[in-house]
Amino acid sequence: MRHQLQQQGLPVDEAPADDEVRETYNFPPGAYGLVYRADIPDQGVQDEDNAPTEAASLPVVDEARNEEHTTTEVSQKQPKTYKYELKAMKWGLIPFWTKRSPDYGSMMRTINCRDDSLIENRGMWNTMKQRKRCLVIAQGFYEWLKTGPGGKEKRPHFVKRKDGQLMCFAGLWDCVKYEDSEEKMYTYTVITTDSNKQLSFLHDRMPVILEPGSEGMKMWLDPTRNKWSKELQLLLKPFAGELDCYPVNQEVGKVGNNSPDFIIPIDSKDNKKNIANFFGNARKAKEVATEVQHDKEENRATKDIPRTEDNAPLPVPVESTENISSKKRSHSPDAEAKSVKVTKLDTTPRKGLATVKAISNKKPRSAVSNEAVTKKASPVKKEAGTQRITNFFNK
């Protein structure tokens, strides 16, 4: 992640250890993710008249009274340049004035921040939007499309940049220390805005995505801009670039599930859940199971026989009924040598053939009356190589 951000023109002077933040394909609220921000104090960069003072007591001699007393020298120095860092923070912003750990439901209400709630200079986001702005780094995000009667069914979709770069969501962060704890906890929220035309079918809201290296992103991350302005508000708009959006595995909807398949299109050949892959794998397994394995020492000549795709027997041209009943197959000594030996057919009734048997027992009707026609068996020569054509198909 650090390398990719640097490739996109974002300097990363500090980053957490690998074991602090791990890659996941199903990131839930309350988990620790990567936030990119300026390395500034927990209260943010303040104006000089509001900044905390650093006092140094210096001895001063009053020559008139020959008395020594102390005075205070105030240092008002702000760094001109700032370092930038990746920091592990918890998703679900908890304001700095919170005294006790909130419940899960309260935290869920602050995982997102609407852009229109930042227009007025009041409310819980007022301090963060002025001095604690950041970027939330991710590969993409999931959104659920409501389908079925009443929208009860939900189909997850994955959204990412078409160019493959990391997504940089506009976000706010804060630092809190509960009254019964000495440890600090850093949390964040993702700012959302109206969906662009590409995602309007999916949801009416989407995260604010800032373009790496743009003037807007530099303005958003500048800690010296510690007053909310119209320029900052105008940065919170739908993404104008190209996105990839496609349905993915339903299992991503359950917290705890985690698989690389979650970001692969459900109809892709690379997705194990693709039904086409299921039948393809079954067919491949069947082909492997039916292959004939010959002994390596076996040496016999083989002959290629043309066959159809499903190995079915080739069709025989149909002759008219008159020709079949009256015409006898002629043969020669050469034909006798090539005749096929026919084994006795098994006439034992089997399950599943009842319908066929019932149809075959019906007596044919005359073409000019309703009387049954007695079917006469055609004589068959019991000579080698002479058979009825139906015997071949019965076999």
Image (cartoon, rainbow, N blue to C red):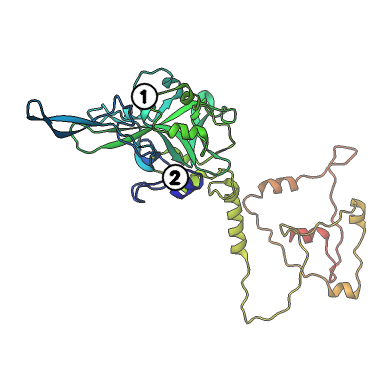
The residue to which callout 2 is attached is: 11
Picture coordinates of residue 350, whole percent (x, y): 63, 54
Q: Nearer the viewer, mark 2 or mark 1?
A: 2
Image quadrant in which you'd find residue 106:
top left
Query: Could you tell me which residue is drawn at 46 percent across and 26 percent down?
Result: 232
As measured in the structure, the alpha-carbon distance from the residue carrying label 2 to the one carrying label 1 is 27 Å
Picture coordinates of residue 394, whole percent (x, y): 75, 58
The residue to which callout 1 is attached is: 125
Instruction: Locate residue 82 relative to residue 380 in the image: left or right.
Output: left
Q: Amino acid at mark 2?
A: Pro
Mark 1 and mark 2 in contact (Cβ < 8 Å)?
Answer: no
In the rendered image, is residue 40 in sight?
yes
Classify mark 2: helix, strand or loop. loop
Crowdedness near tag 2: few (<14), some (14–19) or many (≥20) residues, C-alpha within 10 Å:
some
The residue positioned farthest toward the left in the image shown:
66
Query: Could you tell me which residue is drawn at 90 percent across and 51 percent down?
Result: 320
Classify mark 1: helix, strand or loop. loop
Image quadrant in which you'd find residue 388:
bottom right
- Say if 278 sits above or below 159 in the image: below
Mark number, residue 43: none
Q: Nearer the viewer, residue 108 or 74?
A: 74
- Say if 315 sits above or below 304 in the image: above
Query: Could you tell me which residue is drawn at 43 percent across and 34 percent down?
Result: 221
Q: Earlier in the sequence, mark 2 or mark 1?
A: 2
Picture coordinates of residue 290, whole percent (x, y): 62, 64
Q: Amino acid at mark 1?
A: Trp
Crowdedness near tag 1: few (<14), some (14–19) or many (≥20) residues, C-alpha within 10 Å:
some
- Quadrant in which the C terminus appears: bottom right
Instruction: Locate residue 178 relative to residue 234 in the image: left or right.
Output: left
